[in-house]
Image (spheres, grey):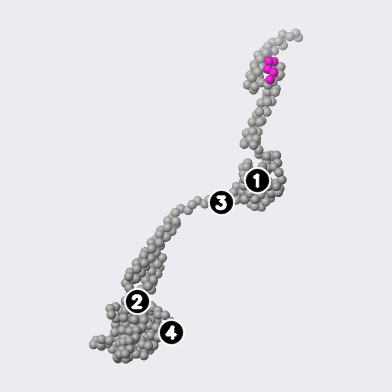
Amino acid sequence: MLNLWIFSCCLLCLMCAFTASGNVVLIGRNVTLSFEDIEANFALPIVGPGKCGTLYVAEPLDACSPLTNKIISNPNDTRHPFVLIIRGGCSFDEKVLRAQVAGFKAAIVFDNETGDLVSMAGTLFLVWIHAVFVSKVSGDTLAKYAGAADMELWITPSYENPSWSIIAISFISLLAMSAVLASCFFVRRHRIRRARPSAPHVREFHGISSRLVKAMPTLVFTAVLEDNCTSQACAICLEDYNVGEKLRVLPCHHKFHATCIDTWLTSWRTFCPVCKQDARTSTDQPAATESTPLLSSSSSSSSSSSSSSATTLQIVPSSYHSPSVSSPQSISSILHDQHSLQSESSINQPYPQDIESSGNSSPS
């Protein structure tokens, strides 16, 4: 459908560019008049030296009904009968077709009002006579000499420079080829895009709501505090704090410029830029510092194991420690001494059989 539309536009441009023009020449004894005309695009074109004939006025003048002044053809007559018709009332092709039926060999249609010349267009393909269009002034002048036997009327084609025609044909042909190629390219591109599988849906990032961010506490910067939470510069924009600036405090107790952290939480991430703690959850733990362990659960378990080991070591009697050791011993030496003590106690402990025999031997 697109290619057909482009071809139709190019054909219309070609027809408009090559509208044939010529002259209508009236020749008499003491009169020679020339009138500019434009040929109809549906009529027989004028070739060669032109056509010579005698002019008649159409009856009726607008030729919107069958003509009453019909011409009987005479093979011996060298002059062809031409008819003069006024514009209006019906279409151009209907006027020319009725002139053809009446026996005329050419139709000269003149304008009914003053204006520029127009190219007569039509849809009938049954016209095989010549047809030209002239101005209103030309038509009024020709009507004065209609029917004069001593006047000859010539319809001649115009002779234009053929180089311009070749250039125009080449340009229009190139334009038509470019339009067809462009339409093929865009149609193929559209089909490839439709055949290509659609990309998986990527979930868009939705930050913290502005209402929740505005509910976080704020303070006015006065000085750097020794709480490991207030530094000299904002960790987001890397600009130093100025006295009087508004800082926003996150649940992890880290502070930033209010505008910087608001944009960060609503558009980029939902956690603290420093400690990575989620800003949507509140906590009662102290702020993270450089000495805070990365895994709090591991640290608590290690501390509990250390305290249990310390408790185990504290129950060892002090009388069994080596007197030569005055400083705190290492864990390995203490464990060795504990093992030795357990061995001695197991050796010195009496067996149950010995206890029972000694009980039997005691005096009653």
Q: Nearer the viewer, residue 203 or 130?
A: 130
Image quadrant assignment for residue 145: bottom left
| Image-based side of 252 in relation to 140, left or right | right
Q: Which residue is mark 3?
A: 204
Residue 116 in the image: state x and y as whole percent: 42, 80
Residue drawn 66% across the image and 31% down it: 303
Residue picked out by circle 4: 113
How packed mark 1 is, by other alpha carbons closer than 10 Å (few <14, some 14-19, many 20 or more), is few
Q: Mark 1 vs mark 3: which is more N-terminal?
A: 3
Q: Residue at x 32, y 82 (%)?
A: 155
- Judge whether 106 appears above or below 332 on screen: below
Specify the amino acid type for callout 1: Asp
Crowding at dot 4, Cα within 10 Å, few <14 / some 14-19 / many 20+, comes out as few
**Visible in this render: residue 270?**
no
Q: Earlier in the sequence, mark 4 or mark 3?
A: 4
The magenta stretch is 323-327
Mark 4 and mark 3: span between their CA atoms? 69 Å
Dots 2, 4 in contact, CB < 8 A: no
| Disc 1: which residue | 240
Helix, strand or loop status at disc 2 = loop
Q: Is residue 331 visible?
A: yes
Residue type pointed to by label 4: Glu
Disc marking residue 329: none
Report how far apart the C-alphas of labels 1 and 4 lie in the structure: 85 Å
Q: Earlier in the sequence, mark 1 or mark 2?
A: 2
Whichever of labels 2 and 4 marks the residue nearer the N terminus, that label is 2
N-terminal label among 2 and 3:
2
Please give left or right for residue 315 compared with residue 87 in the image: right
- Residue 325 inside the magenta-drawn segment: yes
Q: Quadrant of the C terminus?
A: top right
View extreme (right): residue? 364
Residue at which label 2 appears: 20
